[in-house]
Structures are given as C-alpha cells and as structure tokens.
Amino acid sequence: MARVQGKVAIVTGAASGIGRAAATLLAREGASVLLTDRNETDGHAAADAINTAGGEAAFVRHDVSAEADWISVVGGLMDRTGRLDVLVNNAGVSGGLRGIDDTTLDDWRACLSVNLDGVFLGVKHGARAMRRSGGGSIVNISSVLGLVGMPRVAAYAASKGGVRLLTKAAAMEFAANGDNIRVNSVHPGFIRTPMTRARDASREAEWEAFMRAVQPTGEIGDPTDIAEGVLHLASDASRFMTGSELVIDGGVTAR
Ligand SMILES: NC(=O)c1ccc[n+]([C@@H]2O[C@H](COP(=O)([O-])OP(=O)(O)OC[C@H]3O[C@@H](n4cnc5c(N)ncnc54)[C@H](O)[C@@H]3O)[C@@H](O)[C@H]2O)c1
C-alpha cells in the first residue's frame, strides 16, 4: 500500500539533494508532487526523472524568499488540483563558513531570508491552502544546527533554530484553531549533497575527514535517509505527531 497515495504535495528546493530525494520518494509512494526551486534546469530534470519512473510530478520556478512567488505557486496549484495535503519546506542555503566578526548584515539577511523567511511564508500560504483542503501536513527542514551550536555558522544556526520554534508555534496555533494541520521539523546531520561539498575542491578530503570525525559511526548520511523521515511525517502514519522534531543525524547530537 502506497503511503501517501492520492495526496498533493509541494517540495521546495527540490532540484537537488534532500529536496529531490524527498520529492522522488513521495511520488513513488503515490503523491502528486509539485517540485519548486530557483534552479530551473535541475528542477525540470528532477520532475522529468520522476515522471519517467512512472510518478506524477511537475516543476515550477520559485524563490521561497519572495511572497509573490508563494502566492502564485500555491494559487496555481489550487487552481489545477483544488487541494494541498503536504508541504515540505526544504529550500535552504548554507551561508558559508564565517565567523561573526566577518559576517556582514547583508550576509546575515541573505541566509535568514531563504532559511527562515522562506519557511514562514511557506507555513502561511501552505496552511491557507490546506485549510481549504480539510487539513494537511507541513514538514520543515531544520538541521542539527537548529539544536546545537558550532563555530562559524551563526546565521545558519540562527535560521535553523528559528525554523524549529516557528514549527512548534505554528503547530500549537493550528491545533488550537482546529485546522487539522500538523507541523513538524526534521533535523538532518551531515548529509552528502551539493551543500556539504567543499567550496574549494583542493580541501575536499579535509572537509570529508572533518564530517566523518564528528559522526559517532564515521558515516555521512544520504539524502534518502532524510526523505524517509519526511515521508513518515507527510503520511497519515504520523497523524499523532505535531510540533515535534525528528532528528536524523547518525547520532551526532547524542554525544
Ligand atoms: N546536507 C546537509 O548536510 C544538511 C544538513 C542539515 C540540514 N540541511 C538542510 O536541508 C535542506 C536541503 O539542503 P541540501 O543539502 O539538499 O542542499 P542542496 O544545495 O543540494 O539543495 C538546496 C536547494 O535549495 C534551492 N534553493 C536555495 N535557495 C532557494 C530559494 N531562495 N528559493 C528556492 N530554492 C532555493 C537550491 O537551488 C537547491 O536546489 C536545506 O534546508 C539545508 O539547510 C542539509
């Protein structure tokens, strides 16, 4: 039995990495998936691959930090399908590694505008559509860096910590309203995607060694490890979960 059969889903940042894996798994488990991203070439390729494999997918260009984009993406989907059951707020940027003293206000805002404003806008416009659909599930991709700190990632960690509590506040509000909308966060550890590739190719081995050293098992995660958690939170199997945080990190925050 497919686990999200008949559901209509949006996955942001679906051109790459975790978002692409989540969109692919949701489609394989029966959802009709709208992939969105600001990277059109890879976004179309990801949707085409899902359709070729027998799934149901479409792609639309979307900058998650722009409210006008959210209005047109969600409005267009509602016009076509009349419903939204699942929203995965996955799009994100790393902001790079830099100390607080070297972080300009523009650096800070660039990171928060995608990672936190983008999730806020998704929760707002996604929930409006879900209310018209009788309810739904919102899955916000945070990070282990929304739970614990690390040097040289202040903006990223602040954005992901913000996602964690935005999730809980929205979950409480929608529960109190009787909206039947669940909101949960996912906290990946190090996952092998373009985001965790070293900027400078000559330092790839050093970066790989660092990531492995912080993992209790020495293993770096795969995007499908996170997609499985997203699928669970999207599906009715998690109907009693809201406001919770699903940590998928190979044990890194258990130390
Ligand atoms: N890879 C990891 O180790 C890791 C760990 C913890 C959390 N995360 C989070 O997982 C999510 C996915 O990251 P990933 O590792 O797959 O990275 P990735 O770089 O492979 O994918 C991120 C996608 O988001 C898109 N994107 C960026 N800014 C956007 C915007 N303004 N509007 C729309 N799309 C935008 C990019 O084009 C890209 O396709 C991010 O939120 C990231 O912070 C990743």
Image (cartoon, helix red, strand yellow):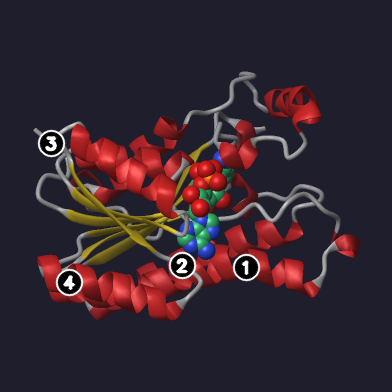
Label 3 near label 4: C-beta < 8 Å? no
Q: Residue at x 58, y 30 (%)?
A: 251
Q: CB at mark 2 closer than 8 A to ligand 1?
A: yes
Judge left or right: residue 22 versus residue 48: right
| Callout 2: SS | loop
Q: Which residue is mark 3?
A: 2
Q: Tell me the crowding category of disc 1: few under 14, some 14 to 19, or many 20 or more residues within 10 angstroms, Cα based.
A: many
Q: Residue at x 62, y 68 (%)?
A: 112
Q: Tell me the crowding category of disc 2: few under 14, some 14 to 19, or many 20 or more residues within 10 angstroms, Cα based.
A: many
How far is mark 2 from mark 1, CA to CA?
A: 11 Å
Is residue 179 among what the camera can see? no
Compare residues 97 and 134 and report the one nearer the observer: 97
Disc 3 marks a residue whose amino acid type is Ala
Disc 1 marks a residue whose amino acid type is Leu
In this view, which residue lies farthest toward the front?
Answer: 41
How far is mark 2 from mark 3, CA to CA?
A: 29 Å
Disc 4 marks a residue whose amino acid type is Met
Q: Which residue is mark 2?
A: 64
Q: Which residue is mark 4?
A: 78
Q: Residue at x 27, y 41 (%)?
A: 48
Q: Which residue is mark 1?
A: 112
